[in-house]
Amino acid sequence: MALTKRIFEGKTLGILTGGGDTPALNASIEAIKSRASVLGYKVYGIRKGWKGLLGDGDIVDLSLQPYDGSYGGTALRSSRTNPFGVSDNSRVAEIMRNLKRYKIDVLVTIGGDDTNGAAKKLYEQEGIPVIGFPKTIDNDLKTKTIHNYNGQLIEGVVCPGFPSAAKGVAEFTNRLATTAESHSRIIVLEVMGRDAGWLTGAAMMGGAEVSLIPEIPITKEKKEEFFDKVSEAYQRSKKHYLIVAVSEGTRWYQEKLDKVDVVYASSEVDEYGHPRFGGISGVIASEIEKKVGIQARAQNVGYYARSGECRNYDKKFVGVLADKVVDLLLREDYGRMPVMSKLSTFQEIEEYHMDTIDMGKIGNQPLPFEYFDKKEFHFNESYIDFLSYFIEKPKSIRFDYNFPQVKPMF
């Protein structure tokens, strides 16, 4: 017998995006919105993350609106507002009041460990029906994604936004070759990723030969090994230039402070207690030039990695993850988040390779040491294999020449 109305007709689902933006956020919103609408939900967008549920609220109706999921970033905007960022819990009270005022029955939070961790806490303490949705270009959420590399099972991570950002970093790095070659320089390329080196590895796809990641502290002794490796790689290069990729969260021995620490762009912290990193590439470039005697310059990928359109892999990926959201909604199984359980190529992104995990067990996943050779300061073939599931090595346009040297006549 046919149903007289859709399953969740009369119910409202709210979507918010919190934390840093990625190229896959609008695609995620579009995918969730479309599937929720099929189930009968009215779909609201909550603007500026958790901030949109404070005060009088900042809510928009997405239900009968077209939505461009190919456009990068988030049309709902974002913020790093923490629902538990004040000691008197007044924000929690405001959020609960607005969820009731706007008659939001289910909340889908698109974010990383901070955003989804706060959502899980609200679910446990206040009973808010929430479903998490992963996002981060840092790719450091513990999604328990298994990478089978020649029979070796490695616990990896794949989060929406990372494939698009990784492709951008590889392309950006590839373009630097011409300017580095022109001046016979070493370019130290700084890559986003906070405390994890996942995204820095994408620079290797673009031609970087040496790398530093946050997972391996560069002590006073380790610095000397690094300088030797840089000099060796530069001299070995046919055209005498080198690109060194460093994570923004690289922990570097600083002589003036006599300690290993990250370089901070600002001493201020956000509402989740995170300081802003930035500037490590300039520090390392300066020290390379002094120590190795080769001209070095700093370059920061910066927000380029987050910017631009959602790439094809991410577009398909978020669609299948949104299918798992439908499953959770139908079973009213809240407090969980969809993830990829088995590393899959574009052609293999299907529901049977997806799973869900408890939002309270997300946590952060550093780059596994199976992916990095700390003696060579280089990502292993296993990591290149990992990246090859969703990006290709950029096509390099190289000027191959071997000009004959002209000698003076006398």
Image (spheres, helix red, strand yellow):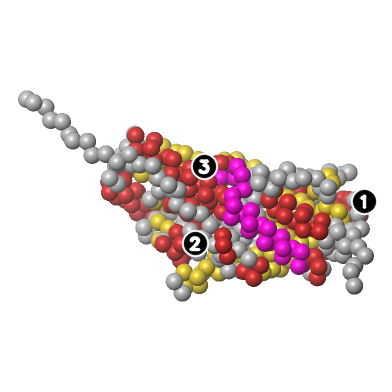
How many callouts does the rendering have? 3
Magenta stretch, residue numbers: 305-327
Quarter holding residue 8 = bottom right
Splitting the image into 4 quarters, where does residue 325 fall?
bottom right
Q: CA distance from mark 3 to mark 2?
A: 22 Å
Please state the horizontal and vertical placement of residue 380, each as a whole percent of the image. 41, 61
Please tell me whether mark 2 sits on a helix, a strand or a loop. helix
Tag 1: Cα neighbours inside 10 Å, few (<14), some, or many (≥20)? few
**Disc 1: which residue:** 101
Residue ranking furthest to the bottom: 151
Please state, as top left, top right, bottom left or bottom right, where the N terminus lies in the image.
bottom right
Q: Please indicate whether residue 186 sits to the left or right of residue 36 in the image.
A: left
Q: What secondary structure characterizes most of the magenta part?
A: helix
Residue type marked 3: Val
* Quadrant showing the C terminus: top left
Q: Helix, strand or loop at disc 3?
A: loop
Disc with the residue nearer the chain's start (3 vs 2): 3
Which residue lies under the disc numbered 3? 301
Label 1: which secondary element = helix
The CA span between labels 2 and 1 is: 46 Å
For mark 3, does the 10 Å Cα neighbourhood hold few (<14), some (14 to 19), or many (20 or more) residues? Answer: some
Residue at mark 2? 386
The x and y percentages for residue 126 are 85, 62
Residue sitting nearer the eye, 169 or 55: 169
Does residue 81 appear to the left or right of 263 in the view shown?
right
